[in-house]
Image (spheres, grey):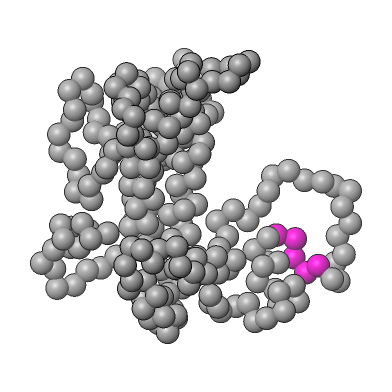
Amino acid sequence: MLELFDTVWAGKDEVVVDHAVDLTLPMALFVIGAAGFGRHISWKDDAVIPPAHQLTFKDALLTTSHDLFIKLLVPGWAMGFTKRFRRARLAFDELQMIQERKGSQLKEDDEDLFSILLAANSDENLLKGEVKLNDSELISNIFILMVAGHETTGHSLAFALALLALYPDKQEELYQHIKRTYDDMPSLSYSSAVFNETLRMFPPCTKVERRKHDVHHHRREWHQENGQGTSRHSSYTGRACASLQP
């Protein structure tokens, strides 16, 4: 975040953000790049493409995150039909090349998720009878655990920023709460409360596809079936639920 102020917004008297998601989605991806792949991404566009690659790591990660559904739905033989399909295929191939190279250069002090999965999947760390995953399966786990969830994280952050803008008193309280040292991180309970309250008011996933049709729905007592309506109805929580209350 400091880099955003020091580079992208440096020297500007006024900064206009038309859509908060334009900030929060890249923030979520940057965390994924570092925690999941061990690669730090800059707010400034990466101008240099690594040798033997056709995309920067940032472009590859952005493309795979936005076009994950293409990889899931389109068969491999059809991935060359359109320009978007071809770019999605290239981005996934680029990330796989990066991870294969990383697997061959694994270090003991690597702490990103992919390195941890690789180490846990090594022959010496497997228990007797456990089946070893191949590289493709490991990469799939990375996408399911992290990339597939970046949009819900980004949108939740955007809602949190919007709510804090609407409630300046809560914003100031949160600001005072986070003005501490790194040693105080475990005690930042108010920060967690703000995000939990944001998720209550604007849950990014409001529906579960699995349904059980024989569950009785009492129309008089249960006002709304969806999770968002329930979490914002005072009869279930016992308080006024239309405002931010961390």
| Quarter of the figure with residue 199 | bottom right
The answer to whether residue 224 is magenta is yes
Q: How many marks?
A: 0
Query: Residue at 70% of width from left, 59% of height from top?
Result: 226
Between residues 48 and 187, which one lies in front from this camera angle? 187
| Magenta region, residue range | 222-226
| Quarter of the figure with residue 33 | top left
Query: Left of 15 or right of it: where is 127?
Result: right
Q: What is the x, y in percent for residue 130?
A: 60, 18
Would residue 107 be visible to someone looking at this image?
A: yes
Query: Residue at 38% of width from left, 42% of height from top?
Result: 35
Would residue 202 be visible to someone looking at this image?
A: no
Q: What is the x, y in percent for residue 222?
A: 81, 67
Give the prevailing secondary structure in the magenta stretch: loop
Query: Residue at 16% of width from left, 60% of height from top?
Result: 6
| Quarter of the figure with residue 135 | top left
Compared with 165, 227 (above or below) is above
Between residues 187 and 59, which one lies in front from this camera angle? 187
Q: Split into 4 quadrants, where in the image is the N terminus?
A: bottom left
The answer to whether residue 223 is magenta is yes
Query: Residue at 66% of width from left, 52% of height from top?
Result: 207
Query: Left of 165 or right of it: where is 226?
Result: right
Query: Left of 200 or right of it: where is 162?
Result: left
Between residues 70 and 106, which one lies in front from this camera angle? 106
Q: What is the x, y in percent for residue 246?
A: 53, 75
Q: What is the x, y in percent for residue 104?
A: 32, 18
